Amino acid sequence: MTIYRDQLEAVYALIEKPESWCQKAYSMDAKKQALGSPVSDSDDDAKHPDACSWCLAGAAIKCGVIRRDTHDGGALSFAGLLDIGDHSGAIAEFNDSHTHPEVLAILKSAIERAPTREQQP
């Protein structure tokens, strides 16, 4: 599975502002209450209409980069572009144990290494 630069840029844009990033949940509402169930195998919590902030994995789910409900190993940690391990839990663990600037830095590094899509004529 190829993860493209524009997909990662969408993830970055979603969590770029500190108030739009969270930890310990895929997404949170305006009151910083977790949405959905942490034991669910569904992507619904990351795509919840009341979501105002996302963790790295939640943002990737919302932007269609990975799917939680398929157990895809975080699309092998964004197709090997994230230097954090090759299982879906690694993304959440990294997000929850690092600062917002650190999360953005690893995402920025992945963006710089990601392939661009070929333009259609």
Image (cartoon, helix red, strand yellow):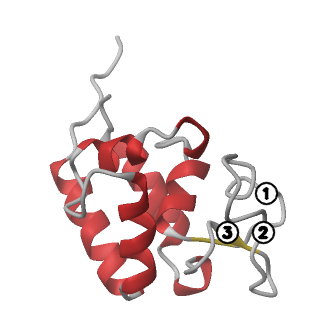
Label 1: which residue? 48
Label 1 crowd (10 A; few <14 / some 14-19 / many >=20): some
SS state under label 3: strand
Q: Are the residues tagged 2 and 3 within 8 Å (C-beta)?
A: yes
Residue drawn at x 30%, y 29% is 117
SS state under label 2: loop
Label 2: which residue? 35
Residue 33 horizontal/vertical position (percent): 78, 82
66 lies above or below 32: above
60 lies above or below 84: above
Q: Are the residues tagged 2 and 1 within 8 Å (C-beta)?
A: yes
Disc with the residue nearer the chain's start (1 vs 3): 3
SS state under label 1: loop
At label 1, the amino acid type is His
Q: Are the residues tagged 1 and 3 within 8 Å (C-beta)?
A: yes
Q: CA distance from mark 2 to mark 3?
A: 6 Å
Q: CA distance from mark 2 to mark 1?
A: 7 Å
Label 3: which residue? 27
